[in-house]
Amino acid sequence: MNWEELLSLRRQGDTNKRLRKEQDETRLGFEVDYDRIIFSSAFRSLQDKTQVIPLSKTSFVHTRLTHSLEVSVVGRSLGRVVGKQLLEKHPHLAAVHGYHFNDFGAIVAAAALAHDIGNPPFGHSGEKAIGEYFKNGSGAQYQSQLTAKQYQDLIDFEGNANGFKILTESRAGIEGGLRLSYATLGAFMKYPKASLPKKPSAHIAHKKFGYFQNEAEFFGEVAREIGLLQYNFGKEVTYSRHPLTYLVEAADDICYTIIDFEDGINLGLIQEEYALEYLIKLVKDSINTSKYNSLTTTADRLSYLRALAINTLIREAADIFIANEEAILAGTFMSGLIEKSKYEAQIDDIIKISVSKIYQSQEVTEKEIAGYEILATLLHTYCEATKNYMEDNCSNYDKLILRAEGAHFDYKNEDPYSRLISICNYVASLTDSNALLKFQKIRGAKV
């Protein structure tokens, strides 16, 4: 891979090449990407989607929106630090093509801002709930109507693939979705492969999948335009990661490791003294002990340690990226950046505590159980009404459901896969509260 292609400013539908040196510095293309994402309705819906605690009523807890904003800020810093060093290493990128180190920051910031835009209600359990409906629930009846890849898309429903769909899908009057630059889309594409083959190698890019079958053609166009390496597994094609994806992933890893941990402390799920001890281990090389000891409140101590920890891990991730740039460009760097960190043991300790004390807490577990029932009910109601419509066998109830909700999904499409993925996309677009409200109305518990 080469940076000239990887930093492509092309957008869906372009007929002419966009050159960096001809860009308007007051309205740079990569920064336009950020603006388009932040003003989108899909991004705004993240304000009521789970990051740590589903349907939380406390202002302490991060939502997907605040998490995404923080990941974007960290990603921007990472991109700038790396970009500065890359331009020193490859001066022709600036001298010939006009790239600035801030361009790298802008690309990573935009991709990081969108990294959770496709996630359904109730966090990662929401993804599992959708998949479970089609694998072991009533949705299993549709398997015979689908190809192997189409069915795999449903039973392994993936927020990253749904995010790519949201960012790129054409709608009436809106060709190409948000029409982001291919560089930003490339950095967003964390898992550049289809749902099958499943985990064809140990490479981190093969852990999940990054696009649904309806977006396969355009996904391939982006991958080829920015010069991602292509791999064949039998008859199936996968691609290498865009190098800046590693920075987007590192920003996410840094934020959920440190900030989810902080939420757990603020919620009282993790004892302050115990937790601060683990954070101090992470920043022991940079902490100013006299300043730390002068802080009198938990919030101030946490804020100080959080800032030090994030800054420490930004520098560490940037150094690892630069040290492994050749392997990353060759597609042979197999893991995330943070996994190569000298602080890996401290990070693992923090994550283990977060898993046991926060993610597996009684409150989270009970709400995830409710989330399974809510999403399964919505999916079943919409899928059954759509199936009955296609079979010309609608009950009065089905007609009411389609009258109330049918405008949100493509229930008239003759292709069963397109109908089902459209329903999944709609259910995934709901906020936690909206999903609960629609469930209550379907059950007759609220009018």
Image (tube, rainbow, N blue to C red):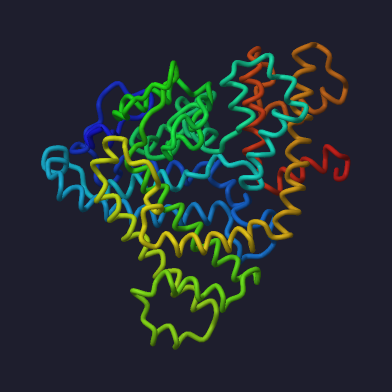
- Percent from the top left, x then y, of residue 62? 57, 59
Front residue of 243 and 387: 243
Name the residue: 65% across, 72% down.
268
- Percent from the top left, x then y, of residue 294? 44, 88
Quarter of the figure that contains the C terminus? top right
Question: Is 426 on the left or on the right of 385, as rendered?
Answer: left
Front residue of 228 and 104: 228
- Percent from the top left, x then y, of residue 30? 33, 42
Depicted 137 relative to depicted 247: above or below: above
Quarter of the figure that contains the N terminus? top left
Front residue of 376 and 355: 355
Name the residue: 63% across, 39% down.
127
Depicted 398 relative to depicted 266: above or below: above
Q: Quadrant of residue 282?
A: bottom left
Front residue of 410 and 91: 91
Question: Is 81 on the left or on the right of 255, as rendered?
Answer: left
Name the residue: 47% across, 71% down.
279
- Percent from the top left, x then y, of residue 237? 41, 22
Question: Is 435 on the left or on the right of 78, as rendered?
Answer: right
Q: Quadrant of residue 358?
A: bottom right
Name the residue: 75% across, 48% down.
369
State how many labels appear.
0
Depicted 261 relative to depicted 179: above or below: below
